[in-house]
Amino acid sequence: MIKKGKKLYEGKAKIIYATSDKNLVIQYFKDDATAFNNQKKSTIEGKGVLNNRISEHILSNLSQIGIKNHLVKRLNMREQIIKLVEIIPIEFIVRNVASGSITKRLGIEDGTVLKEPLLEYCLKDDALGDPLIAEEHIYAFDWANKKEIEKVKKMILRINDFMIGMFRGIGIKLIDFKLEFGRIKINGKTEVILADEISPDTCRLWDSITDKKLDKDRFRKDLGDLIPAYTEVAKRLGILHEQSNVTAVNVTKLSSVKKKNK
Ligand code: TMP
């Protein structure tokens, strides 16, 4: 049995805990939501539960097509055991349709379909507001080497193709998303694997027919109904069934009621 240890790191939406196994950590999904680099903050009850399930589903599907990633297994409603990696300090943003920051930066109309997928790099640095960088910056400052980035690019193309198809099959357009990668020693060799999470917090997902936003833009743009939108994504992915969809959120409510009563 793996035992939970001390808190190693707390991010905006997740907490990482040590475990009794030095190679494994626990990733805890919080209900906190932030946008625009922490300028906007809130707590949305049940969000962490849904992201835990959705991310588990997507990452385990990706490992089935040979995309190595940090997920070992989901432990409970909010936690998963993951492999400890050294995170590459780059946010890899993949865009299929223009939306969000790129529309403002380049004056492109929201919803413009791109001729080919666009990969952007941002430096993972909250104090600097995760600035957009060129690939050359990665090498100039040794944030990763060329071999690692070439490998990451190949993985990203496959991940994008797989996710576009997976979401298209359930009536959702994959507009864009963010990925993170980390280094891990496997049999004495350092390898780069997919890390972090893939969820409606880190993707833009639009209903194929209505273009309804089913992602964190509901929070960023004050559209409301974030939980029903994430639940809809989970339901369409086949993770939650008609009856259990509310259960995910209700169980969190129950557990928070229990905590309050303690
Ligand atoms: P952007 O339009 O704000 O640059 O975001 C592009 C995509 O990346 C969008 O799906 C949201 C996701 N994203 C994150 O997950 N975390 C971040 O810190 C940022 C800036 C974007």
Image (tube, rainbow, N blue to C red):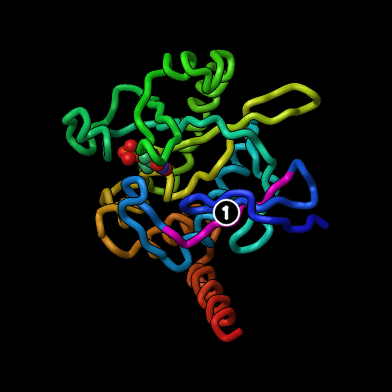
Q: Amino acid at mark 1?
A: Ile
Which residues make up the magenta segment? 24-32
In the image as oriented, which residue stretches furthest toward the right?
Answer: 1
Front residue of 104/223: it is: 104
| Left or right: 129 as drawn, with respect to 199 | left
Residue at horizontal 55%, vertical 30%? 88
- Position of residue 102 measured from the top left corner of the image (x, y, whole percent): 26, 32
Magenta stretch mostly in which secondary structure?
A: strand
Q: Give the position of the N terminus as an image quadrant.
A: bottom right
Which residue is identified by label 1?
15
Residue at horizontal 42%, vertical 50%? 201
* Picture mark count: 1
Residue at horizontal 41%, vertical 41%? 126
Front residue of 200/164: it is: 200
Residue at horizontal 53%, vertical 72%? 252
In the image as oriented, which residue stretches furthest toward the bottom?
Answer: 261
Kind of element beneath mark 1: strand
Q: Quadrant of residue 111?
A: top left
Decide whether residue 30 is among the magenta residues: yes
Q: Quadrant of residue 44?
A: bottom left
- Position of residue 26 measured from the top left corner of the image (x, y, whole percent): 66, 52
Q: Give the position of the C terminus as an image quadrant.
A: bottom right
- Position of residue 8 measured from the top left corner of the image (x, y, whole percent): 63, 49
| Left or right: 214 as drawn, with respect to 32 | left
Q: Quadrant of residue 181?
A: top right
Residue 68 in view (yes/no) = yes
